[in-house]
Image (spheres, helix red, strand yellow):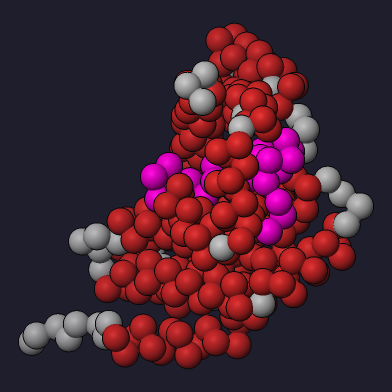
Amino acid sequence: MTEILPLLLGGLLLFIYAISRLSKTMQDISTDKAKQIIAKYTGNLVLSILVGTVLTVLLGSSSAVIIIAIVFINAKTLRFKQAIGIIMGANIGTTFSSQLIALDIGQYAVIPLVVGLAMEFFAKGETLKKYGNALFYFGMLFFGLFIIEQSVLPLRDSEIFEEWITRIDQNLLQGTLIGGFITLVVQSSSATVGMAIVLGKQNLISLAGGLAIMLGSELGTCSDTLIATIKGSRQAIKAGLFHLLFNFITIVAGLLVFDLFLKFVLMVSKSQALENQIANAHMIFNIAGVLAFLPFVGITERLLEYWLPEKEIAL
C-alpha cells in the first residue's frame, strides 16, 4: 500500500490541477461569449438547460458554470429563475467528461501535452497560446488518469481493498457517503467519478459500487457552489440552494430505485466494458434526473422564494 499511495496521490493531484487549470483557461477564452449566450438564451427553461449543458462541455466543469451564473446573479445581469435551467443543464454537461475518461486514451496523453506546449512556446498570437494552454492541460488531465490507472494495478491482489470494496457493494448508502466525502475533499465530482471509472477499468469495483460512488459525487459537488454564495445576494443564495436541493432529491430518488436503475444501465450498455457502463450510468442518471424534476421546478422555485423573500427597500 505504501508503494501505491505516492503514485495514486500524484496522479490524482495532477488530474485535479489539470481540471482546475483547463476550466480557468477555457473561461478566459470563452467568458465574453458565455456572457452573450447566457444573456440571450436563458429566458426559456428548456433553452437555459441547453445553455448550461453546452457551456459545461466547453468549460469542462459544472461548478465553473454554476459559479459563473452566481457571479452574474450578484452582478444583477441574471436572475435566480434564469439560473435554474443553467444549473440543471450543468449536471448533464458534466457527464461528457465521464464519457471521455471511459475512453482508453490515457496512453496517448503525451500527444496533446507536446502539441499544447509547442503552441504555447512558439505561437505568436495570444489566442493561439491560450488554445495551446488548454490543449496542454487536456493532455495533463488524461496523463494524470493514466498514472492513477497504473498505480491501482497492485490493488487486485489486496485482500484489504477487496474487503473494503465488498462493503461498498453491500451498503449503497456507505458507498454514496464515501463518494460525497471524496468529492468534498478533492472539490471535483469529475475526479471522483473518474476514479470510479478507473477502478472499473481494472475490475476493482462492481457496477453497483461505481454507481453508489457516482451518486455521492453529485452531492459533494454542491459544496463549492454553496461557498460561492457566501456574502452574495438572496437571488444567488437561492441558486446555490436550488443546486443542493435538486442534487439531493435526485440522489434520494436514485437510491430508492437503485435496483431498477442498475438493470436499466445493464440493459442499455450490457455489451460494453465496466468503465463504459459507469460512464453511461452517470449520463443516464443526470439526464433522467433533469427530465423527472422538470414538473417540480415551479414548486421548488416558489418554495425558495417563500423561504428567502427579497428584502424590502426602506423608503
In the depicted view, which residue is nearer to us: 239 or 123?
239
In the visual, does 10 lie left or right of 155? left
Task: Look at the picture and state if 168 lies above or below 312.
Answer: above
Does residue 56 appear left or right of residue 208 in this picture? left
x 57%, y 55%: residue = 168
What residue do we see at 78% from left, 47% from top?
274
Residue drawn at point x = 72 percent, y = 35 percent: 202
Q: Which residues are magenta?
A: 184-208
300 lies above or below 97 = below
The spot of residue 205 in percent (x, y) is: 67, 46
Q: Is residue 219 magenta?
A: no
Residue 100 visible in the shown view: no
Q: Quadrant of residue 211?
A: bottom right
Q: Which of these two is toward me, 244 or 312? A: 244
Residue 153 appears at what percent x and percent y? Answer: 67, 27
Residue 57 versus residue 115 in the image, above or below = below
Q: Determine the residue positioned at 68% across, 17% down.
A: 110
Looking at the image, which residue sits at the far right?
A: 271
Picture coordinates of residue 286 (x, y %)? Answer: 64, 65
